[in-house]
Image (spheres, rainbow, N blue to C red):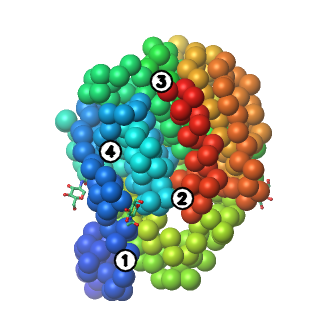
Amino acid sequence: MTTKITCAYLTIIVNTVLSNPSLMPVSIPQPEDATLNFTGLGQKYGHEVEEHSVVTEDGYILTVFRIPSKRKTPVMLMHGTSDSSDSYIIRGNRSLAIYLANEGYDVWAVNGRGNHYSRRHVKLDPDTDPEFWDFTFHERGYYDLAATIDYILKITGENGVHSIGHSQGTTNNLVLLSSRPEYNEKVKLFTALAPIAFLDHLVPPISLIAPHGPALNDLISLLPLKLDEIGGSWERNIYKVLCNQGIMSYFLCVLIGLFPGNGYDTKRLEPSFLPIIIGHAPAGDSKKGILHHNQAIISKRFAYYDYGPEKNMKLYGDVTPPDYNLKQITAKVALIVGKNDNLSRVQDVEHLRQLLPNVVEYHLMKQKKWNHLDFVWSNDMPETLFPVIFPLLAKYS
Ligand SMILES: *[C@@H]1O[C@H](CO)[C@@H](O)[C@H](O)[C@H]1NC(C)=O
Ligand SMILES: *[C@@H]1O[C@H](CO)[C@@H](O)[C@H](O)[C@H]1NC(C)=O
Ligand SMILES: *[C@@H]1O[C@H](CO)[C@@H](O)[C@H](O)[C@H]1NC(C)=O
């Protein structure tokens, strides 16, 4: 009896503290850039920012940030798994969004359904309706990017956008352009930073965990946790404490946490930048999205979501889900890859490259240590990555 009461009491305390970072036992001095959102960062680094709401065909309401300009083509930026628009701006004066804006491009930074900026729907409540979380990278491509492109073209009166994606943001683009081919005309150039489609050449630890993904998921499903959402507010608050303790946190959160799956590159992600990352990521996503990538690892295919034979038959008319038809992607594509990227592996991107009909540029970053995260978080992007991206944008505008 006493144990039960104690447990209930503890649960209330833990929940209250986790949902109110200000009540955390440790006081965490945060750098300003950890606390500003996309709008605040844009203003701090010299630009006006607009906040737009884009409603998708299936009712999700997305926050899209714009740094407006009438001088050059609109550029749509799409983030990766459990990430947000902010990754494109948290390097401040050295970030892609600010560089694009300084160059006169009209910048549109998307937030995929389910991250904290886009946790809204015309009917569904993300806190109580599990259907809200019933999506993967498929829906973020098929619905979210489609709605955003149409919205941008409507507002600007332009006839096409530049699309830039990082990591799962590239998967979203590949889904859209292969399953709704009419969007190829609306994309002048799709620049894929660390492209993710095939995941056949992963290395430990992910290659060791992935085969057990479905079993792990069954196990987790037995726990009394609401886990349709990942990287939501309570997880963010745990990270805020764990990853804001100076050099110990760098060890725990970067060396042990981030680098094994993404590749080691301590030079480009310095300890003082960690609190700024933790102020913005993880940003929230669906668990189903991870399961969808996991299916790709196991099946060695880039295919629609596998619901099991019965539901597949109903949805797709076959017991196995169809592959995304990459041959439909007639838009110009630039693939940019890092040698030390342990998620977007060079061999897997070569595979993708062979199946895409219109690759106009394939670029292997020449920095030996360039990893998966360096495409958005590296401290030397203006010297390393932007000289690759900007000439392409100019050439295909
Ligand atoms: C960004 O931050 C500003 C200032 O705190 C706030 O007014 C605005 O509503 C925020 N925007 C979004 C989309 O969260
Ligand atoms: C960013 O760059 C602009 C233009 O070079 C400069 O005026 C501004 O002071 C810089 N902002 C910060 C916060 O460093
Ligand atoms: C990434 O993969 C390479 C093999 O290609 C390996 O040498 C390296 O240790 C892996 N892990 C990290 C964290 O870089």
Give the residue displayed 63% in from the left and 16% down from the top: 327
Which one is closest to the eye, mark 1 or mark 3?
Answer: 3
Check disc 1 and give the amino acid type. Answer: Gln
Instruction: Work out whether mark 4 precedes mark 2 in sequence or the reverse, and give the earlier one.
Output: 4
How many labels were placed on the picture?
Answer: 4
Q: Circle 3: is it few (<14), some (14-19), or many (20+) Cα within 10 Å?
A: many
Check disc 3 and give the amino acid type. Answer: Val
Relative horizontal placement of residue 379, taking residue 141 as reference (left or right):
right
Check disc 2 and give the amino acid type. Answer: Trp
Would you place residue 147 above or below residue 219 in this image?
A: above
- Residue tagged by mark 3? 187
Using the image, tell me which numbered label, if any, was put on residue 377: 2
Which one is closest to the eye, mark 1 or mark 4?
Answer: 4
Q: Is residue 131 visible?
A: no
- Residue tagged by mark 1? 30
From the top left corner, tell me how far across and down residue 124 is, in percent: 23, 39
Check disc 4 and give the amino acid type. Answer: Ile
